[in-house]
Amino acid sequence: MHDGFIRINDVMSMTGLAKSTVWLWVSQNKLPKPIKLSSRVTVWKKSDINNWIEQHSKAVA
């Protein structure tokens, strides 16, 4: 399975979280850590975010 990278706006769309909450939760280890591709480009593995959503939807259900 191809595991693409997604940017902050995609993480926000997928999770429904605000940008500040994404960064806060990353710092608190509540969200997967991103990968820094360069000094200006930060991405997440799409599968990491999908797995996080799946785990947290089960916890709420």
Image (tube, rainbow, N blue to C red):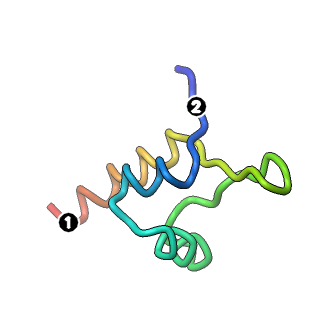
Residue 2: give x, y in percent of width and height: 56, 22
Determine the CA span between mark 1 and mark 2.
27 Å
Callout 2 secondary element: loop
Residue 3: give x, y in percent of width and height: 57, 29
Q: Which residue is identified by label 2? A: 4
Quadrant of the rendered image containing residue 61: bottom left
In this rendering, the answer to whether 2 lies above or below 49 is above
Asked whether 27 or 58 is in front, the reply is 27
Contact, CB < 8 Å: mark 1 with mark 2?
no
In this rendering, the answer to whether 21 lies above or below 33 is below
Q: In the shown orientation, is residue 13 left or right of residue 59?
A: right
Amino acid type at circle 2 is: Gly
Q: Residue at x 37, y 50 (%)?
A: 14
In this rendering, the answer to whether 5 lies above or below 58 is above
Amino acid type at circle 1 is: Val
Asked whether 38 or 1 is in front, the reply is 38
